[in-house]
Protein backbone atom coordinates (compact mmCIF):
# COMPACT_ATOMS: atom_id res chain seq x y z
CA UNK A 1 0.00 0.00 0.00
CA UNK A 2 1.22 3.49 -0.68
CA UNK A 3 1.84 5.80 2.30
CA UNK A 4 -1.38 7.77 1.71
CA UNK A 5 -3.53 4.67 1.96
CA UNK A 6 -1.53 3.21 4.84
CA UNK A 7 -1.93 6.37 6.92
CA UNK A 8 -5.59 6.72 5.93
CA UNK A 9 -6.14 3.19 7.21
CA UNK A 10 -4.49 4.11 10.54
CA UNK A 11 -6.61 7.26 11.02
CA UNK A 12 -9.75 5.38 10.08
CA UNK A 13 -9.43 3.40 13.31
CA UNK A 14 -9.48 6.55 15.44
CA UNK A 15 -12.72 6.98 17.42
CA UNK A 16 -15.43 8.68 15.39
CA UNK A 17 -13.35 8.96 12.19
CA UNK A 18 -14.68 7.71 8.86
CA UNK A 19 -12.67 6.98 5.68
CA UNK A 20 -13.22 10.45 4.18
CA UNK A 21 -12.14 12.28 7.29
CA UNK A 22 -9.16 9.95 7.60
CA UNK A 23 -8.04 10.86 4.09
CA UNK A 24 -8.51 14.56 4.83
CA UNK A 25 -6.13 14.20 7.78
CA UNK A 26 -3.53 12.67 5.48
CA UNK A 27 -3.79 15.52 2.95
CA UNK A 28 -3.62 18.03 5.78
CA UNK A 29 -0.37 16.41 6.93
CA UNK A 30 1.00 16.43 3.37
CA UNK A 31 0.57 20.20 3.37
CA UNK A 32 2.56 20.68 6.57
CA UNK A 33 6.26 21.52 6.53
CA UNK A 34 8.76 18.84 7.64
CA UNK A 35 9.44 20.65 10.94
CA UNK A 36 5.88 20.52 12.16
CA UNK A 37 5.58 16.88 11.08
CA UNK A 38 8.69 16.12 13.10
CA UNK A 39 7.17 17.87 16.13
CA UNK A 40 3.98 15.87 15.72
CA UNK A 41 5.78 12.52 15.57
CA UNK A 42 7.87 13.48 18.61
CA UNK A 43 4.72 14.29 20.56
CA UNK A 44 3.17 10.97 19.58
CA UNK A 45 6.28 9.09 20.69
CA UNK A 46 6.36 11.09 23.95
CA UNK A 47 2.79 10.01 24.75
CA UNK A 48 3.73 6.55 25.92
CA UNK A 49 6.96 7.71 27.53
CA UNK A 50 5.55 10.46 29.71
CA UNK A 51 2.04 9.29 30.34
CA UNK A 52 1.18 6.63 32.88
CA UNK A 53 -2.04 4.96 33.84
CA UNK A 54 -3.24 5.42 37.41
CA UNK A 55 -3.22 2.21 39.45
CA UNK A 56 -6.52 3.10 41.15
CA UNK A 57 -8.76 4.99 38.72
CA UNK A 58 -7.01 3.93 35.48
CA UNK A 59 -6.99 7.40 33.98
CA UNK A 60 -3.91 8.48 32.07
CA UNK A 61 -1.76 11.11 33.72
CA UNK A 62 1.42 13.01 33.04
CA UNK A 63 4.33 11.39 34.76
CA UNK A 64 6.22 14.66 35.26
CA UNK A 65 5.41 14.55 38.97
CA UNK A 66 6.47 10.91 39.30
CA UNK A 67 4.43 9.20 41.95
CA UNK A 68 6.07 6.17 43.52
CA UNK A 69 2.77 4.36 43.99
CA UNK A 70 1.62 5.07 40.42
CA UNK A 71 -1.38 7.15 41.47
CA UNK A 72 -2.69 10.20 39.66
CA UNK A 73 -3.08 13.59 41.32
CA UNK A 74 -6.74 12.97 42.20
CA UNK A 75 -6.21 9.52 43.71
CA UNK A 76 -3.25 10.83 45.71
CA UNK A 77 -5.27 13.71 47.15
CA UNK A 78 -6.28 12.59 50.64
CA UNK A 79 -8.43 15.70 51.16
CA UNK A 80 -11.05 14.28 48.79
CA UNK A 81 -14.17 12.49 49.97
CA UNK A 82 -13.26 8.81 50.22
CA UNK A 83 -16.86 7.76 50.81
CA UNK A 84 -17.78 8.48 47.19
CA UNK A 85 -16.70 6.79 43.95
CA UNK A 86 -17.89 7.88 40.51
CA UNK A 87 -17.78 5.55 37.50
CA UNK A 88 -17.24 7.24 34.15
CA UNK A 89 -16.79 5.73 30.69
CA UNK A 90 -13.67 7.55 29.58
CA UNK A 91 -10.91 9.89 30.75
CA UNK A 92 -12.54 12.75 28.91
CA UNK A 93 -15.74 12.32 30.98
CA UNK A 94 -13.72 12.47 34.18
CA UNK A 95 -12.17 15.71 32.97
CA UNK A 96 -15.62 17.19 32.24
CA UNK A 97 -16.89 16.36 35.75
CA UNK A 98 -13.68 17.62 37.33
CA UNK A 99 -13.98 20.88 35.41
CA UNK A 100 -17.55 21.35 36.64
CA UNK A 101 -15.94 21.48 40.09
CA UNK A 102 -18.81 20.25 42.24
CA UNK A 103 -17.66 16.67 42.85
CA UNK A 104 -15.06 15.97 45.54
CA UNK A 105 -14.97 12.17 45.65
CA UNK A 106 -12.83 9.74 43.68
CA UNK A 107 -13.32 8.26 40.20
CA UNK A 108 -12.95 5.05 38.28
CA UNK A 109 -12.61 5.06 34.47
CA UNK A 110 -14.44 2.08 32.97
CA UNK A 111 -12.53 2.33 29.71
CA UNK A 112 -15.62 2.21 27.49
CA UNK A 113 -19.26 1.24 27.45
CA UNK A 114 -21.32 -1.83 26.67
CA UNK A 115 -23.35 -1.83 23.44
CA UNK A 116 -26.83 -3.34 23.67
CA UNK A 117 -26.90 -7.14 23.14
CA UNK A 118 -23.13 -7.26 23.46
CA UNK A 119 -22.01 -10.85 23.92
CA UNK A 120 -18.91 -10.14 25.96
CA UNK A 121 -19.62 -7.19 28.25
CA UNK A 122 -16.74 -8.11 30.55
CA UNK A 123 -14.31 -7.30 27.76
CA UNK A 124 -15.74 -3.82 27.20
CA UNK A 125 -15.14 -2.37 30.65
CA UNK A 126 -12.50 -2.82 33.38
CA UNK A 127 -14.74 -5.02 35.43
CA UNK A 128 -12.11 -6.89 37.44
CA UNK A 129 -10.15 -3.74 38.23
CA UNK A 130 -13.34 -2.06 39.42
CA UNK A 131 -14.24 -4.96 41.72
CA UNK A 132 -10.70 -4.95 43.07
CA UNK A 133 -10.82 -1.22 43.83
CA UNK A 134 -14.19 -1.59 45.55
CA UNK A 135 -12.74 -4.41 47.63
CA UNK A 136 -9.82 -2.18 48.64
CA UNK A 137 -12.13 0.63 49.66
CA UNK A 138 -14.38 -1.76 51.54
CA UNK A 139 -16.75 -0.20 54.02
CA UNK A 140 -15.19 3.27 53.64
CA UNK A 141 -17.23 3.50 50.45
CA UNK A 142 -20.72 4.85 51.05
CA UNK A 143 -21.91 5.88 47.63
CA UNK A 144 -21.09 4.72 44.13
CA UNK A 145 -22.29 7.07 41.39
CA UNK A 146 -22.79 5.60 37.92
CA UNK A 147 -22.10 8.49 35.54
CA UNK A 148 -22.43 6.87 32.13
CA UNK A 149 -23.64 8.79 29.08
CA UNK A 150 -27.34 9.51 28.52
CA UNK A 151 -27.58 7.29 25.45
CA UNK A 152 -28.46 3.65 24.73
CA UNK A 153 -24.94 2.32 25.38
CA UNK A 154 -24.61 4.39 28.55
CA UNK A 155 -27.95 3.15 29.90
CA UNK A 156 -27.07 -0.43 29.02
CA UNK A 157 -23.73 -0.07 30.80
CA UNK A 158 -25.48 1.37 33.86
CA UNK A 159 -27.87 -1.60 33.95
CA UNK A 160 -25.00 -4.04 33.68
CA UNK A 161 -23.12 -2.27 36.48
CA UNK A 162 -26.16 -2.24 38.74
CA UNK A 163 -26.44 -6.02 38.62
CA UNK A 164 -22.67 -6.53 38.78
CA UNK A 165 -22.40 -4.35 41.89
CA UNK A 166 -25.52 -5.48 43.72
CA UNK A 167 -23.56 -8.03 45.73
CA UNK A 168 -20.60 -5.81 46.72
CA UNK A 169 -23.11 -3.05 47.58
CA UNK A 170 -24.76 -5.38 50.04
CA UNK A 171 -21.50 -6.65 51.44
CA UNK A 172 -19.96 -3.20 52.02
CA UNK A 173 -23.19 -1.27 52.56
CA UNK A 174 -22.81 1.41 49.92
CA UNK A 175 -25.60 2.91 47.90
CA UNK A 176 -25.60 2.99 44.11
CA UNK A 177 -26.92 6.12 42.43
CA UNK A 178 -27.41 7.30 38.88
CA UNK A 179 -26.88 10.81 37.58
CA UNK A 180 -30.12 12.78 37.25
CA UNK A 181 -31.15 13.26 33.69
CA UNK A 182 -30.54 16.97 33.56
CA UNK A 183 -28.37 15.65 30.77
CA UNK A 184 -30.44 15.68 27.63
CA UNK A 185 -31.11 12.27 26.12
CA UNK A 186 -28.40 11.13 23.78
CA UNK A 187 -25.80 13.41 25.28
CA UNK A 188 -22.37 12.32 26.32
CA UNK A 189 -20.90 13.58 29.54
CA UNK A 190 -17.92 14.85 27.63
CA UNK A 191 -20.02 17.52 25.90
CA UNK A 192 -22.17 18.56 28.87
CA UNK A 193 -21.54 22.05 30.24
CA UNK A 194 -20.50 22.45 33.91
CA UNK A 195 -23.96 23.67 34.98
CA UNK A 196 -25.65 20.59 33.48
CA UNK A 197 -23.16 18.28 35.19
CA UNK A 198 -23.78 20.05 38.51
CA UNK A 199 -27.53 19.60 38.13
CA UNK A 200 -27.17 15.96 37.10
CA UNK A 201 -25.08 15.38 40.25
CA UNK A 202 -27.52 17.19 42.53
CA UNK A 203 -30.44 15.26 41.05
CA UNK A 204 -28.83 11.83 41.24
CA UNK A 205 -31.11 9.11 42.50
CA UNK A 206 -30.46 6.01 44.51
CA UNK A 207 -30.86 2.56 42.89
CA UNK A 208 -30.77 0.27 45.90
ZN1 LIG B 1 -6.25 8.01 39.73
Image (cartoon, rainbow, N blue to C red):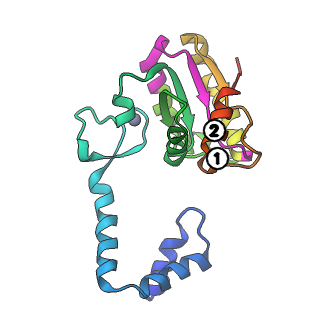
Which is more N-terminal, label 2 or label 1? 1
* Occupied quadrant, residue 123: top right
Residue ID at (33%, 34%): 71
Nearer to me, 16 or 122: 16
Indicate left or right for 115 with 112 as reference: right
The disc at residue 201 is none
Residue 150 on the magenta segment? yes
Marks 2 and 1: in contact by CB < 8 Å?
Answer: yes
Q: Is residue 188 above or below residue 169?
A: below
> Quadrant of residue 183 in the image?
top right
- Left or right, residue 162 beside residue 142: right
Which residue lies under the disc numbered 2? 197
Residue 61, horizontal then vertical, whole percent: 36, 45
Q: Residue at x 58, y 10 (%)?
A: 173
Left or right placement of residue 163 versus residue 96 in this view: right
Residue 157, position as x, y percentages in the image: 66, 39
Nearer to the camera, 43 or 170? 43
Q: Is mark 1 within 8 Å of ligand 1?
A: no
Q: Position of residue 25 (x, y in %)?
A: 50, 78
Mark yes or no: residue 116 visible.
no
Please provide the residue range marked out in magenta: 132-152
Residues packed near mark 1 inside 10 Å, few (<14), some (14 to 19) or many (20 plus): many
Give the residue at mark 1: 192
Residue at x 50% of width, y 72% of height: 11
Q: Residue furthest right?
A: 185
Left or right of 179 in this view: 127 = left
Q: Is mark 2 within 8 Å of ligand 1?
A: no
Mark 1 element type:
loop
The local secondary structure at tag 2 comes to helix
Tell me if I can see residue 2 in this picture.
Answer: yes
Amino acid sequence: MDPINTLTEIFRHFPGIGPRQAKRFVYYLLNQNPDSLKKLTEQILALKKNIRQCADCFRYFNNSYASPNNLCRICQDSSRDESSLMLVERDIDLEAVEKAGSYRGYYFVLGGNIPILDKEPRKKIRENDLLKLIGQKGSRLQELIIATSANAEGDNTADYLKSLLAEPAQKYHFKISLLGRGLSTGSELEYADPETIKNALNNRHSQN
